[in-house]
Structure formats: C-alpha cells, structure tokens
Image: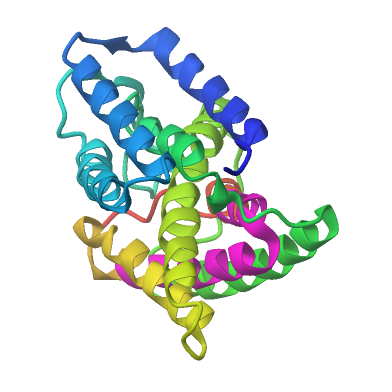
Amino acid sequence: MKALPWLYLALLSLGYGWALSIGHLGWLALITLGLLLITAFAVRQQQVPVARLLGHAVFIFLALSLALHWLPGFDNGRAIARLRFTDDAVPFVMYLNLDKPLIGFWLLLACPWIVAARSLRQTAYASVFALTLSAILALGGALLLGMIAWAPKWPDQAWLWLLNNLLLVTLVEEALFRGYIQGGLSRLFKHLPHGDNLALLLASLVFALAHFGAGWHWVLLAGLAGVGYGLAYRFGGLGAAIATHFGLNLLHFGLFTYPMLAG
C-alpha cells in the first residue's frame, strides 16, 4: 500500500485549520465525515474489489455535493464581501469553505497514487512550460474575448486571497481533476493507444464543464487552462499541476481585471 503524501496533507491541514478557526461546523457535518472515512477504508482495502468500486462511487457523489455546498453542517464564512478590486471589475465575493477541502483530504488519504511523484527538476520544468502555455491560452483568450484588461494591482486583501486560493482551492481542485480523474483514467486507459492523451483531454473537459454555471466563456477558458494543468500533471506530477494552476490564478489576480470586466 502506497505511503501517504504527508507534505500535501500538511498543506491542506494548514489551510483547513485556518478556515476552521474562522468558520463553524455543525453536528450534521459529522455524518459526511463518517461517510468519507468509511469510503476511504473501502477504497484502501484490497480484499473486496466490489467494496472498492462502491467506495469510489459514494465518494464521487459526496465530492459533487461538497463542491456544490449541498451538505448540511458547514457554515462557510464570507471573507471578502462584494469588493471591486478595480473600478471596471465586477464585485468579488470570497468564502472560506469548510466543506470543499474535505475532497482533497479524502483523495490524499484514500488514493495517495494521485501525487504521481516526479523529481524536483521535472516538476520545475513542467510547471514553467505549462504555466506559459496556460497563460497564453487562457489569459490570451480572455483578453481576446474582452473579458479582462490589463490592471496591475496588489490590494490589501491580496494575502487573504492568496492563502485561500492556494490552500483551499487550487490544491483541492488539482487533486480532484488531475490526480483523481486524469490519473485514474490514465490507469484505466494504460493499455489503449494514446491513453494518457485521452485521459488528459477527458479530465480537461470535466474541469471545463464544472464552470458551466459561469457561462460558456468560462467553460472555454477553463478547458484551455485545463490542458495546461493536465500537461503539468502528466510530466511534473501533482506539485507541477498545483503550481501551474495557482500561478495562472495569481497572474490573473495581480495583473489583469479580477475576476472580469463589468457589463
């Protein structure tokens, strides 16, 4: 059984503990925690294959519910309330979510293979290449679509945004979309010609569709960015995917209209 990725668990624990100190948990959240523990045990055991499949199925349902904030017992505190970082931007709201990070905890505990460990050199090279590509595709596309404009800034709330985006957003999303979905599909398709490429494209498509509620523009841009994140994961592991995703978000936040131009 593969060793747990303690570095990623420590980072996620730091972010979750920070959010937990500000927000609140109700007793109903214990039901979700219990189900996650049961499914993690089912997935980690090797004796009953059917139990592993059932564990994955229940987790997928719980992950969707946690990501959409459907489950009771989680009081996600609002950290930034309708703030315009620039005069021409739409108002930005940010919550410190206590539910969504549980997805990352489960993945790292139940499926440590998602880390796809690479050497530091591989991780660095893959991150630089993938971030460059993602910035050209996603930020370039957003500029062409008239969604953002050049707007360098570093507001007082930037450090709060930075911690939240790295520890509670990017790490969790990359563990799910690249580690679990792309990595899992790569394992499933390992005997197919170009199976890794197919896994990358399918994971990027799922990531794009996860932004459906924001409109087709964001679906397109997320899909393009997802290709870059997928390449980072394939050649540099989970660390490269997180670095690429966070790096792109940071470029968007610090140098361009955030989150987008108003009307």
Name which residue lies at 71% across and 70% down: 129
Colouring mode (rainbow / by chain / secondary structure / one colour): rainbow
Q: Position of residue 109 (x, y in %)?
A: 48, 35
Relative to 82, say whether 221 is above or below: below
Would residue 247 appear left or right of 63 to someone viewing this image? right
Kindly give the residue lying farthest to the front in the view shown: 47
Q: Residue furthest right?
A: 121
Image coords of residue 4 (percent x, y): 60, 36
**Residue 253, above or below 69:** below
Q: Is 234 on the left or on the right of 64, as rendered? A: right
Question: In the figure, residue 205 lies in which quadrant?
Answer: bottom left
Q: Residue 233 sits in which quadrant?
A: bottom right
Q: Residue at x 59, y 71 (%)?
A: 231
Nearer-the-camera pick, 127 or 34: 34
Note whether 112 is above or below 214 in the view shown. above
Image position, residue 41 (x, y; %): 37, 33
Q: Which residues are magenta?
A: 219-246
Q: Is residue 146 visible?
A: no
- 172 is higher (above) or lower (below) than 140: above
**Nearest to the observer: residue 236 or residue 90:** 236
- Left/right placement of residue 23 relative to residue 117 reads left
235 magenta-colored: yes
Instruction: Please name whichever residue, 111 or 146, is drawn nearer the observer in this view of the structure.
Output: 111
- Quarter that holds the N terminus: top right
Q: Is residue 74 visible?
A: yes
Which secondary structure dominates the residues rendered in magenta? Answer: helix
Queried whether the magenta region covers residue 90, the answer comes back as no
x then y, percent, for residue 27: 19, 8
Quarter in which the C terminus is drawn: bottom left
What residue is drawn where x is 41% and y is 35%? 106
